[in-house]
Image (spheres, rainbow, N blue to C red):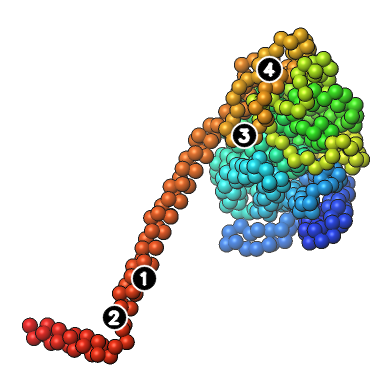
């Protein structure tokens, strides 16, 4: 293979970003082609590279970038089936996002900088996927963090966007600090930052601190992939433009952490303790985020918590030792989650609100956005995990991996012994993933029914479609399009493009010479037990949500309603104070958990109490010491010198007799002192 092809994949979007920044503001007509063409070309090249590489093949190439006095840093490429598959996903989603954004942000004066940042974001993810050196991978990792800061804060004139971008940056950096030390320690133990060398050292048992390395790396993964306890930034990141949410959630930033663990899976298999920690982290993330999603009123926050939970599925598969099941779900989820966010953007454009309770009071909403209605339905079925959509096959692959790990037969596919995965990790993932399947079906059904299928009578009883639920966290997005106009084709055809893999990708895992041959070669077929159990739980969740919705709708139609729960998170963007009553099955299903789940079980409050307040208090103390003490000494020394200068200046009269008199007095004084 010509090495220029994989080198151009990250280079083209980066060059497109530079060109868009250079000429976009002066020539706005060039901004859109400069945004789309390089990313689309990179997507095509990623597909060409994947086809030329084929299945079961790897490509390693490197040139020394700089000596360090220890392990050298190399500009290296490491290609295999995993990098090929994920790079195609990144290219597809990024191209759809760029095309979609040309219509969604049509009137935005900052579109050139936005498009350039999306291109740079895409280039950074390509660099992470293709890099064969951990330090170069870290560069792409950090560039994505910077891009996410600017893109989430695109509407910087709003307080929500400013605080969300800062929160995302700080929380992810909190994980990146131990992550950096983990990379340094891994390079020191393996005597190389090259990924093939690191994997070889792990396979030969030459890593001296595998548990410490794995735990340090997991801290960065928890931040980047929004896993508990560093998950809180992702729901608030919904203050950014909807296409950015699609890119972050589907194919770039949050996928990077899962990809890194999959890439370094032999390292993690050396530490059973790290796998148990990863399993617990995934379990808490899955269940907690699914409960939170069931209580949200903001459409994008529902999808955000859904992403957190689905990333928990991927982390659970990794904790079970099966990285190909994890990556299979990553790719499947990338397709249907990008579709969900882009379809949500169309719905928000038409409804002029993010609130699903407000959408429930808009008559005929589904008829106004038929493309979004049908494609969102397809994506939600895939999210629930019902056959024959892709989410069913990838979710069942995760459950199957957990089942085998729980039985002591982990599907490591030759990366390590099955005994390397503790059975406890398998049981933790299996039980939590099964419960999450039930909750996922419930919140997906709730979203679809409340937003699109509220009866006219219930909508009339609920009031005008202008208010949101008063107690609901809400991240309003600045309107970029006129809701009175129909959605342009640039916002519609990407939905159907993404619907194709959402419906058909799962079938690729059924035959061993298709997707499994591209990955580790193990089976991706769901086992009969997990397939029946997972699907049965999903059906139960759908029926439970439907029954609760019918009951709530009937009560609302007859005027027997329950008041909305009171209380809001301090500083959280929110709805007007007026109480809004809506037929919400989430209240029925969650009962007393509804209020805590709506506000993330108080995790933000806890962090505010434990970390934010002490840090701000320390900052105020430092400011006081700097201004009142340190600056006081500095100003005092300056004032003293000034007063001394004034005193000396008084003696400078310009009168020669005065000078001679002072000189004579000094001579006399010295003579007396000498004589005495």
**Circle 3 SS class:** loop
**Circle 1 SS class:** helix
Evaluate if marks 3 and 1 touch, with contact meaning CB atoms under 8 Å apart: no
- Disc 2 or 3, which lies upstream in sequence? 3
The image shows residue 497 at horizontal and vertical percentages of 90, 38
User: What's the CA distance linking mark 2 and mark 3?
Assistant: 66 Å
- Disc 3 or 1, which lies upstream in sequence? 3
Q: Answer yes or no: is residue 615 visible.
A: yes
Tell me what residue is drawn at x 84 percent, y 36 percent: 483
Which residue is label 3 attached to? 572
Q: Nearer the viewer, residue 288 or 658?
A: 658
Camera-side mark, 4 or 3: 3
The image shows residue 231 at horizontal and vertical percentages of 63, 35
Camera-side mark, 2 or 4: 2
* Residue 642, disc: 1
Above/below status of 456 relative to 218:
above
Tell me what residue is drawn at x 87 percent, y 24 percent: 364
Q: Could you classify mark 1 by the number of other residues whose Cα lies within 10 Å: few (under 14), some (14-19), or many (20 or more)?
A: few
- Disc 2 or 4, which lies upstream in sequence? 4
Tell me what residue is drawn at x 57 percent, y 47 percent: 177
């Amino acid at each position: 293979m010509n090495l220029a092809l994989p080198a151009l994949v990250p280079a083209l979007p980066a060059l497109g970003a530079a060109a868009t920044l250079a000429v976009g503001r002066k020539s706005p007509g060039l901004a859109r082609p400069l945004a789309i063409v390089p990313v689309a070309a990179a997507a095509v090249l990623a597909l060409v590279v994947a086809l030329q590489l084929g299945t079961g093949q790897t490509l390693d190439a490197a040139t020394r970038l700089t000596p360090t006095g220890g392990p050298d840093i190399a500009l290296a490429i490491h290609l295999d089936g995993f990098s090929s598959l994920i790079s195609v996903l990144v290219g597809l989603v990024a191209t759809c996002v760029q095309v979609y954004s040309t219509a969604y942000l049509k009137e935005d004066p900052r579109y050139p900088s936005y498009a350039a940042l999306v291109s740079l974001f895409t280039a950074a993810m390509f660099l992470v996927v293709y890099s064969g050196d951990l330090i170069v991978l870290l560069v792409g990792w950090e560039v994505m963090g910077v891009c996410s800061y600017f893109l989430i804060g695109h509407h910087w004139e709003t307080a929500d966007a400013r605080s969300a971008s800062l929160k995302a940056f700080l929380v992810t950096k909190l994980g990146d600090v131990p992550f950096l030390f983990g990379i340094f320690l891994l390079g020191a133990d393996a005597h190389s930052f090259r990924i093939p060398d690191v994997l070889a050292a792990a396979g030969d048992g030459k890593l001296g601190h595998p548990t410490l390395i794995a735990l340090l790396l997991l801290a960065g993964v928890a931040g980047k992939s929004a896993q508990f306890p560093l998950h809180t930034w992702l729901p608030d990141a919904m203050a950014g433009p909807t296409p950015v949410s699609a890119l972050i959630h589907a194919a770039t930033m949050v996928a990077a952490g899962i990809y890194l663990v999959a890439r370094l899976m032999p390292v993690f298999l050396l530490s059973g303790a790290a796998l148990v920690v990863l399993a617990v982290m995934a379990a808490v993330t899955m269940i907690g985020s699914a409960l939170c999603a069931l209580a949200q009123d903001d459409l994008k926050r529902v999808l955000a918590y859904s992403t957190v939970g689905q990333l928990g599925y991927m982390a659970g598969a990794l904790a079970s030792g099966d990285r190909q099941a994890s990556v299979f779900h990553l790719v499947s989820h990338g397709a249907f989650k990008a579709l969900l966010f882009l379809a949500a953007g169309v719905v928000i454009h038409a409804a002029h609100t993010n609130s699903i309770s407000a959408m429930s009071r808009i008559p005929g909403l589904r008829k106004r956005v038929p493309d979004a209605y049908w494609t969102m339905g397809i994506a939600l079925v895939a999210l629930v995990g019902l056959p024959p959509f892709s989410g069913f096959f990838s979710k069942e692959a995760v459950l199957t991996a957990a089942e085998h790990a729980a039985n002591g037969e982990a599907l490591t596919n030759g990366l390590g012994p099955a005994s390397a995965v503790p059975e406890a990790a398998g049981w933790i993932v299996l039980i939590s993933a099964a419960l999450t399947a039930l909750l996922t079906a419930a919140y997906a059904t709730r979203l679809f029914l409340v937003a699109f299928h509220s009866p006219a009578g219930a909508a009339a009883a609920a009031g005008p479609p202008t208010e949101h639920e008063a107690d609901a966290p809400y991240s309003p997005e600045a309107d970029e399009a006129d809701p009175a106009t129909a959605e342009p084709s640039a916002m519609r055809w990407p939905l159907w493009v993404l619907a194709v893999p959402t419906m058909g990708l799962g079938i690729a895992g059924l035959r061993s010479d298709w997707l499994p041959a591209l990955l580790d070669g193990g089976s991706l077929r769901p086992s009969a037990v997990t397939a029946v159990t997972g699907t049965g739980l999903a059906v139960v969740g759908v029926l439970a949500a439907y029954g609760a919705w019918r009951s709530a709708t009937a009560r609302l139609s007859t005027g027997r309603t329950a008041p909305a729960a009171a209380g809001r998170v301090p500083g959280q963007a929110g709805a007007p104070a007026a109480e809004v009553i809506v037929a919400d099955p989430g209240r029925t299903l969650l009962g007393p958990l509804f209020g805590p789940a709506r506000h993330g079980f108080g995790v933000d409050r806890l962090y505010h109490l434990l970390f934010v307040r002490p840090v701000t208090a320390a900052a105020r103390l430092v400011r006081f010491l700097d201004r009142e003490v340190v600056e006081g000494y500095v100003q005092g020394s300056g004032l003293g010198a000034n007063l001394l200068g004034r005193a000396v200046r008084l003696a400078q009269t310009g009168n020669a007799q005065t000078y001679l008199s002072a000189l004579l007095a000094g001579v006399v004084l010295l003579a007396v002192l000498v004589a005495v």
